[in-house]
Image: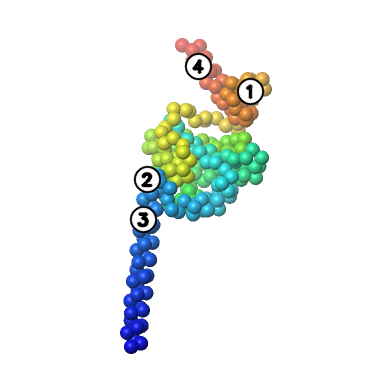
Amino acid sequence: MKSKVLVVMLLVAGALAAAVIVRAQQQKKGDRSGQMNGMPGMNNEEMNKRGDQVMGFDHAKTTHHFRLLAGGGAIEITANSAGDNESRDQIRVHLGHIAKMFGAGNFHAPMLIHDQTPPGVPIMQKLKSEIEYHFEETERGATIHITTKNREALQAIHDFLRFQIKEHQTGDSLEVSAAETPAVTAQDLDTQLPSESVQLWAGVSGCCDPERTAVRARLIRMRASARLDTASTT
């Protein structure tokens, strides 16, 4: 009698274990399917936890933006509060490291955060010499400007950024903007514009970051000078 009861108990336990395994597999498959279609997956909270650990700051106190541009793209992170200097500094440290890592073909950070290899990464690794990553500090955080002249690399960059937009649910456009990615940083400048020119440009553009304003104004001046030089030789 005892042996029969034991057999029944074992059968019931086996059936329950099988049901749990099947349910877990179905849930995992559903989560992955949701991610592939840009839908919020069941493991979104876990992704955010991994992101906080890898990036070194609280995702709830910061905002991500990913821009698809004609010449590449941009990764922007800002602190939500103007007085949150801790998050601002942590963002700058993180994106400073990321710019160097991506430039070396190291995408370990996003692979850890998303628990998979994001689309575009294999090509971006293969063509790392064809892609440039420019780090820039902003008022509340930092930006990485990504540029390339290689068509295959450009498509990979856009695939990577679209994936980030969907995963982080930023609401950014999945279409490529015609806006141009700045190719000059403050460190590249050997001269500075007069302060009145910077102030004038700041008033026109509405930009409140003097360093960024100077870079953009310098870039426009360089282009205007190049046009004048070309015209004088023709």
Q: Which amino acid, mark 3?
A: Lys
Q: Earlier in the sequence, mark 4 or mark 1?
A: 1
Q: Which amino acid, mark 2?
A: Asn
- Whether residue 10 can be seen here: yes
Question: Looking at the picture, does residue 53 appear above or below residue 103?
Answer: below
Residue holding disc 4? 227
Q: Earlier in the sequence, mark 4 or mark 3?
A: 3
Q: Is residue 33 left or right of residue 138?
A: left
User: Is disc 4 surrounded by few (<14), some (14 to 19) or many (20+) residues within 10 Å?
Assistant: few
Q: Secondary structure at mark 1?
A: helix
Please name the residue shown 36% across and 55% down the image: 29
Q: Secondary structure at mark 4?
A: helix
Q: Earlier in the sequence, mark 1 or mark 3?
A: 3
Residue situated in front as seen by the camera: 186 or 143: 143
User: Is disc 2 surrounded by few (<14), some (14 to 19) or many (20+) residues within 10 Å?
Assistant: few
Residue holding disc 2? 37
Q: Secondary structure at mark 3?
A: helix
Q: Is residue 222 left or right of residue 41?
A: right
> Total label count?
4
Residue holding disc 3? 29
Q: Earlier in the sequence, mark 2 or mark 1?
A: 2
How far apart are labels 4 and 1 at the CA level?
21 Å
Residue holding disc 1? 198
Q: Secondary structure at mark 2?
A: loop
How far apart are labels 2 and 1 at the CA level?
45 Å
Q: Which amino acid, mark 4?
A: Arg
Question: Looking at the picture, does residue 97 appear above or below residue 194?
Answer: below
Q: Earlier in the sequence, mark 3 or mark 2?
A: 3
Q: Nearer the viewer, mark 4 or mark 3?
A: 3
